[in-house]
Amino acid sequence: MSYKNFPMVPRVIFGRGSFNQLNDIIAPKRLNIKAPFIFLIDDVFRNNAWLTSRINLSYDDRIIYISSKEEPKTSQVDELVEEIILMAKERPSGIIGIGGGTLLDLAKAVSIMLNNEGETKNYQGWDLVKNPAVYHVGIPTISGTGSEVSRTTVLTGPEKKLGINSDFTPFDQVVLDPELTKDVPLNQWFYTGMDCYIHCIESLQGTYLNTFSESYGLMALELCKDIFSEDTLTKEQAEDKLMMASWHGGMSIVYSQVGVAHALSYGLSYLLGTKHGIGNCIVFDHLEEFYPEGVKLFKAMKEKHNIELPQGICADLSDKDFDTMIKIALSLEPLWENALGKKWKSIATPKKIKDLYKKM
Ligand code: NAD
Ligand code: ZN
């Protein structure tokens, strides 16, 4: 038996207002005055002086605003890397991603691709990255994905939606400032928060579970219950707790895997562009047979917060469309094996998956 040896985020700062310390944190990492820091920021913050006025740009440092309407694509990473190489006199000192999972994943991918040859799509998979990434910092502004701790950056490529899973993917520094999440809209708060809840359920119910994953998963699940099914927390407390739930949920899947909801959600995302948080919710709503307790509580939380999920998103799809989604979903073998065990193929048949998609 050989155990996997995982890298972790080596530095993290937590606290309301800790974002104010960003300039001091990154300053020692400047390689020289020609090597800029590049800030990749969700364009929801474009004209938001409360956030951006706290970033000191020196020398050739630049902010690039990026829309998170669509999830990251390998071609988008290639374009960003090209743009950065053209604009910078030297290889950047660091990439700082500010936003949700979309921006965090882009920052991770760009920092890897600045130091690795060829196209991003060639690195989708496990342990394909050869050279360490450029110094990269993750600053979440919405909580739930766990991207701030994870060893992957999920990208849609020409052939597949799959992460760059590597030892060079995790951030070198994370800034956890729950105050940055104060203006997240209610629906989005729920969808991305449920990503964390679903990580916990899939990890805790999975066959890959070990004590490392379980202890993080249980912590994150408790926090999610406090946040989404009780009324005892102030808004600030709920923001603080969800940021830590996201972290622990992400830690829980380091040593295990996600499961059925994520596999099916990747299929929706690939074909229809359904975003991760809402896609997971749409799928999870129909997974009673796999996660009976987890889905029951999910439905109660959905009700409590008056969340209406889209219905009938697969109503007009052709057989070919269903086949595409089924192929993407079934290609994620570790997710199915984690969820259903070694004999998963006898349970997760194409017909079974099609029946599930038809309900959505
Ligand atoms: P997101 O980054 O797409 O953001 C969702 C929405 O919230 C956007 O409209 C964004 O503009 C808005 N937003 C973010 N912060 C805000 C703020 N403070 N105030 C107001 N609006 C704000 O959503 P997400 O759910 O965080 O991330 C989804 C992405 O994360 C997907 O691409 C998914 O594949 C990826 N993901 C990655 C991992 C990983 O381990 N790498 C894990 C799970 C999900
Ligand atoms: Zn997820």
Image (cartoon, rainbow, N blue to C red):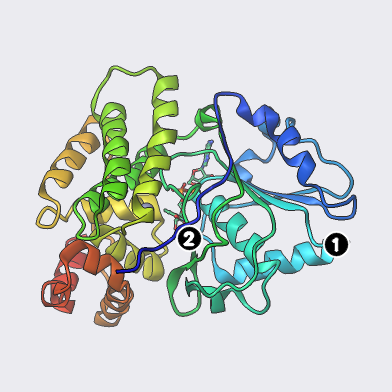
| Secondary structure category for the residue under label 1 | loop
Assess mark 1: CB under 8 A from ligand 1? Answer: no
Point 64% across, 64% down: residue: 132
Mark 1 residue type: Glu
| Secondary structure category for the residue under label 2 | loop
Q: Which residue is mark 2?
A: 152
Assess mark 2: CB under 8 A from ligand 1? Answer: yes
Q: State the image coordinates of residue 269 (x, y, percent, origin top left).
A: 38, 64
The image quadrant of residue 321 is bottom left
Tell me if I can see residue 322 in this picture.
Answer: yes
Q: Which residue is mark 1?
A: 90
Q: Is the C terminus in the top left, top right, bottom left or bottom right quadrant?
A: bottom left
Point 45% across, 21% down: residue: 236
Judge left or right: residue 39 versus residue 151.
right
The image quadrant of residue 217 is top left
Crowding at mark 2 (Cα within 10 Å: few <14, some 14-19, many 20+): many
Judge left or right: residue 122 versus residue 116.
left
Which mark identifies residue 257?
none
Q: State the image coordinates of residue 179 (x, y, percent, origin top left).
A: 54, 26
Judge left or right: residue 230 versus residue 177.
left
Q: Is residue 350 above or below residue 339?
A: below
Q: State the image coordinates of residue 193 (x, y, percent, origin top left).
A: 36, 40
The answer to whether mark 2 and mark 1 are in CB contact below 8 A is no
Crowding at mark 1 (Cα within 10 Å: few <14, some 14-19, many 20+): some
Q: State the image coordinates of residue 1 (x, y, percent, origin top left).
A: 29, 69
Mark 2 residue type: Thr
N-terminal-most mark, 2 or 1 = 1
Q: CA distance from mark 2 to mark 1?
A: 26 Å
Q: Is residue 56 above or below residue 328?
A: above
Residue at the bottom extreme, as displayed:
320
